[in-house]
Image (cartoon, helix red, strand yellow):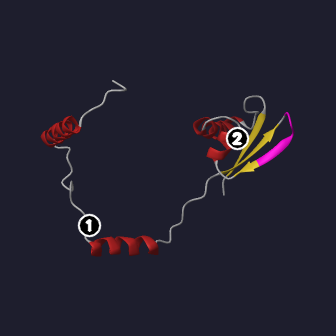
Amino acid sequence: MINRVISAETRFKMSKSAIARLEREGKLSHFEGKKHTPEALNLLRTAALKRTKLHKAGVEVEITDLETKLTTTYESIRKAAKAINSDIKSLSRREKSQLEKGITPYRGRYIVVFKRS
């Protein structure tokens, strides 16, 4: 099925079938096919430009490699996780664990310190 070529006519029939199924199930949005007027788009654009709430910065993470004795500070958990070839969830759980049990080496090699403001 990977290399199967579907004709335009068949794609059209599949689309119609999917739309009919969604309508039967009541899942088709009542906004389907509608567009904003130019005036509405300008209002939305103006409102977006007036927003003052800025993006929340990530949690700063300081990682010390016990083998190389090198300490590096990362601006987010995501970047820290990528640097030590880990995943975000593991480091997030690590933060909670450290609050309960104290700081211990992560993977026997890294000391991870979370700096929340």
Q: Against 12, is 35 above or below?
A: below
SS label for mark 2: helix
Is 82 in front, or is 59? 82
Q: Against 67, is 114 above or below?
A: below
Residue 70 part of the magenta-drawn span: yes
Segment tinted magenta in the rendering: 67-72
Residue 73 is left or right of residue 42, and the answer is right
Q: Position of residue 63 (x, y in %)?
A: 76, 43
Q: Which residue is mark 2?
A: 83
Q: Amino acid at mark 1?
A: His
Residue at 23% x, 37% y is 11
Checking the image for residue 94, the label placed there is none
Residue 4 is left or right of residue 82, and the answer is left
Q: Position of residue 38 (x, y in %)?
A: 28, 73
Q: Amino acid at mark 2?
A: Ala
Neighbourhood count class around disc 1 (C-alpha, 10 Å): few under 14, some 14–19, many 20 upward: few
Residue at 69% x, 38% y is 98
Q: Quadrant of residue 56?
A: bottom right
Q: Which residue is mark 1?
A: 36
